[in-house]
Structure formats: C-alpha cells, structure tokens
Image: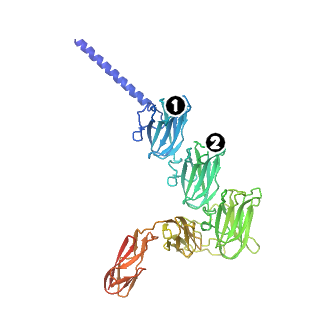
Amino acid sequence: MERKSLLHVKKMTVLKKSGITCLLTLLLMICMCGYRTQLTYAAGFSDAREIRTNQDVYDSVINGSEYHQNFYKFTTTQSGYVTIHFSNPIQRNAEEYWKVSFYNSYYEELYSEGIFGNQTRTELLTTGIPAGTYYVKIASAAGQQAKSTDQYTFRADFTASENWEKEINDNFLSASPMELNMEYSGTTRSGSDMEKDYYRLTVSQPGCMDIVFSSPQQKSQEAYWKVHLYNSFYEEICNKLIYGNQTTTNLPSIGLDRGIYYIKVTSASWSAPSSKDIYRIRANFRTSDVWEKEMNDDFTTATEINTNTTYYGTTNDGTDYEKDYFRFQAITAGNYRIQMRTPNMRDGGAYWKLYLYDNSYKQMACIDIFGNQTVQYIDRNLPAGMYFAMVSSANWHEARTTDVYELSVVKLNDYGQPEIPTQPAWPTQPTQPVVPTQPTQPVVPTQPSQPVTPTTPSEPEDDYCSVEWNVSSATLMAGQTTDALVAEVTGDDEVELYASSNTGVLSVQPNGIMTAHKTGTAVVRAITKRGNVAIIVIKVQKKAIETTGITVDTKKVVLKEGETHDLDAELTPVTSSEGIRYTSVNSKIAIVNRSGVIKAKKQGKTTIKVKSGKKTVKVKVTVK
C-alpha cells in the first residue's frame, strides 16, 4: 500500500513539472513572438490596444452586415515621422475590404486610406508628427462593400527627426517651426479638401530668401503642389505651382525685412493629381541691407533706399503684375538718375516698367524696360524732397520674368556723370547699421539718402531718432473718429506722412486723426522726415468699444480757493467709444468742466467722479 502511494506521489510530481515546463514554454513563445498574435477586440479610442512601433501586429475584423473596427494606439517621446504598412491575403475581387485611419491624441484624423482586395501590400502616407499618443483604426469597408475575416498584418514604422512637418499644421496658428537654411520634409494627402502644410519662420535681419522645393519625378507633367509665402499679417507675398516633371523648383528670390513669415504647401487643387511622395523644402536666407523689403506694393509700404547705392528686387510673374515701391530723399536740388540694370532677356519685349513719383504721389515719368537692353534710366532735375521709384512687371499680355533686377538713384554732376560711384553689387557687409530698437522697420541713418563724403563731418553718434505708436494695436468702432492713437517721435525728427493700407476701412488725416469707415483691418504707417517708420494694426468692428479701465494722474487734490487743477484721465483701451464724463458731488466746494479742469470754490471737501461706460473712479478734493 505504501509502495502504491509513493508511486502515486512521484507520478503527480512528474505531471506538475511537465505542466510547469509547458506553461513556461508557452510564455516564452509569446514573449518571442511579441505582438505577432491576434489582439482582443477594441471598438473605440477609449479601449484602444497598446502596440509598439516598428513591430508587426496581426489581427482581423469581424465579418457581417455591420461595420466593424479595431483601434490601436502607440506613444512617441520624440518628434519624427511614421509610415503605416498594411498587408493582407489576395481577395476575390478589387473592391475595398478595409479602411485604415490615423488619428492624433485629440482624435483628429490625420489621414485615411482604403485597402482593396487586389492589393496584398499597401504603404500608407508618411506623416510628420510631434511627440505624443496616436491611434490607428482598421475597419471593415462601410456599407455594402466586400467583407473579409482574413487575418491582416500592419506595422507603424516610426523614425525620430526634427526636420519634418508636425501634423496637424493646417493653418497659420498651428504652423510647424522651420529654421532658415535647413531642409524639411512633408507630405500632402490627396482628396477634395486640399490639405495644407504651414511652416513658420523667423527672420532676425533684413535680407533675401530663396525657397527651394524638391520632389520625386511624377507620372505626369500636371501641377501636383503649390507653394505660398506669407508675411506676419497673412498677406501672400508670392506663390508657385510645382509640376510633376520638375524635381527641383525655385521660387523667386524675395527681399524681406526682419519679422515672422509663413510657408504653405498644398496640393495644387482638388482636381489635381495627388502624390503620396515625400517633398522637401528649404528656405535659404542671406542677410543683406540692399534688397527690397516685401510687402512694398504701395506708397505707404515703400522700401527706404539711399542714393548712390545699388538695390535688388524681383517682380512676381502673373496676370496681376506685381509692383515694388522705393522711397528716397533728394537731399539737395539737382539732376538725378533713376537707373535699372537687368539681365539680357534676349528679346525686345517689355519685361518691366519704371516709374518716378513726387511726394504727393503724382507721376513724373515712366519708361518701359525692354529685355534686350540691360541698362535703362530716367534723368530728372529734382528739387530737394522725398520721391518714389516704382518697378512693376509688365502687363499680363507682355513678357514676364522673375529674374533679379538692380535699381539705383544717383545724383549727376554738370557733365551728366554720377557724382559718387554706386556701391558694388552684393557687398559682404551690410551697407547700413541695423538699429535693434526698431524691430518692424530698420532705422536709417541721419542722412538716409546721401552717403557722407570724406569732406563732410559725420553726424554725432548720439543723434538718434525713432518713432513708435503709443499702442501696438487698436480696435475702433465703425464711424468713430479718434486722436488717441499717437505716433511718438524721439530726437530731432517729426512725422511727415501718415498712410493707411486700406482707406475704405480707415482713413488718416495729415495730422494723424483717424476715422473708421467700415468693418475690416488696416495697417497705418507713420513716416518721419528722416525716413523712420512705425506701424500699427487697427481693427474696425460694428459694436461699441467698451471701457475696461480708467487711470487718473492723482486721486487726491488739495487746492486753495480760486485755484485750478487739470485732472489727467486715460481710458483703457485708449480708443474707447464711451467717452469720459466728470461730475462734482458738491459743486459749492469745487466744480469740474468737460475737460476735467477742477476749480476750487470755497473751503471744504468734495469728490470728483470720473465715469466712462460702466467704470467709475473717484478723486478726493480738499479746498483750504
């Protein structure tokens, strides 16, 4: 009996060891296989199954009359780009069997693509992403499409990189950051929504930008992409279509001031052929003070230039023919030459037009710049003062080019020769020092239009002038007139000209008083006699501008009988349309007029109330 019990115990021990061995073997196989096993069903974002990037995942969707879907998620700790690969057995027809969708952590769809039965391997769109959590949804085809319970395989391949777009970057506010002189990659998904990729650049010094776009050779010569350049006001500076037979495309060279700029890459149009290929884009930038500064397409935005210096610019080709305005000072009266030097275009067509205007914007001269003449100019006897030169591309039905032109203004001597030779092209050092305290517009030297000759003493270093608005931006009500927006000048200078970019929205009188006409946005520029410029962005709305605060110079006033005090009160915002009202609690002690002047009547105490809209401030007055 004891022998049988002992044999039974030994047998149970062997079975337990065998069971443990089998279990360990099974666990080892699972670990070695990783995610190469079917996952449990996950029907939404909340229960999405965690997967690892760069590893295969095997799964299937339930077949039947209903729409079924599986959700997966993965997390990246770095920015980079991801490509989803999907493979499946060949199906019985070419209909859509699955649909793969890719989402960010806000459940916003980045793209989706159908998987058809005659495709066994599909590589989905490569997408640039920031660090974060992402979701993959694999669903059976919707509606009455074909269904399959066959096992599929997919893999989310991720590569870390800082030189990729970061989806979702489909507007100015979500633009991906881009460094100058570095190449970035991206893709645009196909579809009628015309996906957009925005990039944001910071230019710290004036200079010239060349945008280079490259892509693989496409299957047709049609336009596949379109590239746009915008300034910080979201105004388009230039654009160019990218065709399938062009692997490298250069946008026109563009002169820019310091500031924020945006590049937008889109599919060419909703009906254009699409491409999942990766494009590459680079914003090459070189610092220079002798390039035009876009946008300089009217008198108010004209680029300030010096005489006896060569400047550079380009005009966009197109039906609207772009204009470049330049502003210069004739320091002394005399004969001046406004000269253009252009490449030899090898034909006699008119490629540009050169205009000369006086300070009242009256045209003084105009000539056509022909392609077979490399040097052409306007000679005029000019009184001392401010003038404008304007270069435009020819009318849309004439020849067009994006080649770089040269422009210079020189004073002539009695023999018709330049008094001072122009500076050489492309100087290695900036021709004018950049004044860091004026970010929106470089401050030009004290003598902006005429370099100082050796016989003329230079201006003292402390002769500094600048102009700045009392606020950076403002809002007005349609129909409102205000003098509260003031361009403040320091140094021996004064405002010579106020100009609005949209006079239909907002007009400015010569003394700076502004009148809002209708809803919209306008940029107002204050230009001083020495060429300094300050800008303010003004929004015009229908509703009243409410007062949010009142500030007074003092809250306690002590006066003797008969004395007065001019109470200084300021509203926030300064453009409030609700006005200021002054009242005295006891007019027998002190009175106050509409302008805030307090007059003491007899001994005692009272309070002056300063009211605007719903805001009130009290000032205590004591009369001794």
Residue 140 vertical placement versus 285 (above, below): above
Task: Give the image location of residue 453, x and y in percent.
Answer: 66, 73
For residue 366, side relative to residue 124 (left or right): right
What distance separates the C-alpha of mark 1 from that of mark 2? 27 Å
Helix, strand or loop at mark 1? loop
Residue 504 placement: quadrant: bottom right
Q: How many labels does the image show?
A: 2
Residue 451 placement: quadrant: bottom right
For residue 597, side relative to residue 533 (left or right): left
> Which quarter shows the C terminus?
bottom left
**Label whose residue precedes the other's in the sequence (1 or 2):** 1
- The residue under label 1 is 88
Residue 241 vertical placement versus 501 (above, below): above
Residue 303 vertical placement versus 268 (above, below): below
Look at label 1 and name its amino acid.
Asn
Look at label 2 and name its amino acid.
Gln
Helix, strand or loop at mark 2? loop
Task: Give the image location of residue 340, x and y in percent.
Answer: 71, 64
Asked whether the viewer can see residue 582, the reply is yes
Residue 332 placement: quadrant: bottom right
Residue closer to the observer: 302 or 48 = 48
Return the mark for residue 218: 2
Farthest residue, direction left: 1
